Image: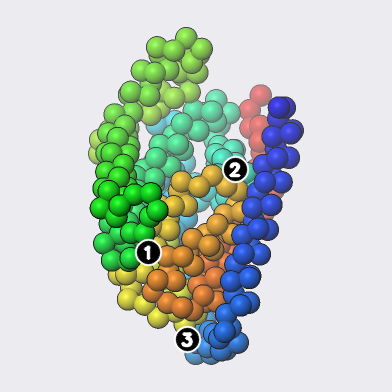
Amino acid sequence: MNKSTKIILNYLLGAGLFTWLAYSIYSQLIHRDNLQQSVQHMWGVLQEKGWVGIFLVTVLMLFNWGLEARKWQKLVKPLEEVSFLRSFSAILSGVSLSINTPNRVGEYGGRILYLKNHNKLKAIAATIVGSFSQLIVTIIFGLIGLLYYINNYALAKESAFLTPSLWQKLVLITGTVICGLTILLYFRLQIILSVFEKIPFLRKAKVFVQIIVKYSSGDLRYLLLLSALRYIVFSAQYLILLDALGVEFLWWQAFLLNSVIYLVMAGVPTIAIAELGVRGKVSIFFLGLLSSNTVAIVAATVGIWLINLVIPAVLGSVLLLGVKIFKEK
């Protein structure tokens, strides 16, 4: 299978998945008995207090990507000094290029355009370390949320194949083991470099991953802190938008169930447009346990996708117009 075929299949599968999920969500909404009342309630709440919430969520979007920019600035520091503004521009450009790529891998390409040519490939490994730190935070919060979900909602305990107690133990033990191994590898990044040194066909690429061993334990903990702060920010964005659209919930319950949503999304390979459909279905499943206001849950999911992904992608595409891909001869 050549590269062109793979790209076409990725787009077709992504578009097909999005279409199927979007139709599924539409069918679920259209057959609600109180659809009109739900829409009227959501609109009334939005008129009363929602615009303040939307403004706050938009402002927090800048903090969300600003924290990611600070992480990337820290990550590429062993290669070259990058100002925060330049780092922020690189992040937005990365979002722009990632919008139509599987699991947003295009993000790496957008970011490295802002570095000197001899540092571009080396910066990809640095960016992966940053994604690693965010994944660890997602898994930790996700496991806490999953524990709450399993212990409090009967639907999570139903299984035709496993008893509830065994199902719980399998999920939690597997999740905990994965979390532990991920954290261990994160603080022992030299293991990855050792793999490159021992495998013959990877040795030539070793120079591009050597940066990962230049981060001290303090640096890695700092990156985890920034990742945790960013996690709290984009979680708060979603909860604020849900409230602005009239969804009633206890914030801590919504936070815990939302953490399970992020955990599920972290394990689903998809492109941005299909991600919207997947996120919608998963959000309805988990947050539907707290509220029957499905219309507002879907609206909040679409809203957060537009604010956190589409708007930054548009800004990033504008910034890309001024980027010189080849800065040096």
- Please name which of the two marks, 1 or 3, marks the residue nearer to the observer: 1
Quarter of the rendering occupied by the C terminus = top right
Badge 2 local density, few (<14 within 10 Å), some, or many (20+)? Answer: some
What residue is shown at x 55% (from left), y 25% (from top)?
Answer: 118
Q: Residue at x 28, y 66 (%)?
A: 152
Residue occupied by mark 1: 155
Q: Label 3 near label 1: C-beta < 8 Å? A: no
Task: Check residue 312 in the rendering and tell me which mark sits there, or answer none.
Answer: none
Q: x, y percentage for residue 165?
A: 25, 53
Q: How is the image coloured?
A: rainbow
Q: Residue at x 43, y 55 (%)?
A: 262
- At label 2, which amino acid type do we have? Pro
Residue 128 in sight in this render: yes
Quadrant containing the N terminus in the rendered view: top right
Identify the residue at image location x=61%, y=59%: 21
Label 2 element class = helix
Amino acid identity at mark 1:
Leu
How far from the left and from the top, in percent, is residue 221?
27, 42
* Residue on which the image places disc 3: 49
- Mark 1 crowdedness (10 Å alpha carbons): few <14, some 14-19, many ≥20: few
Measuring from the top left, give residue 110's x and y in whole percent. Answer: 59, 42
- Determine whether the residue tagged by mark 1 lies in a helix, strand or loop: helix
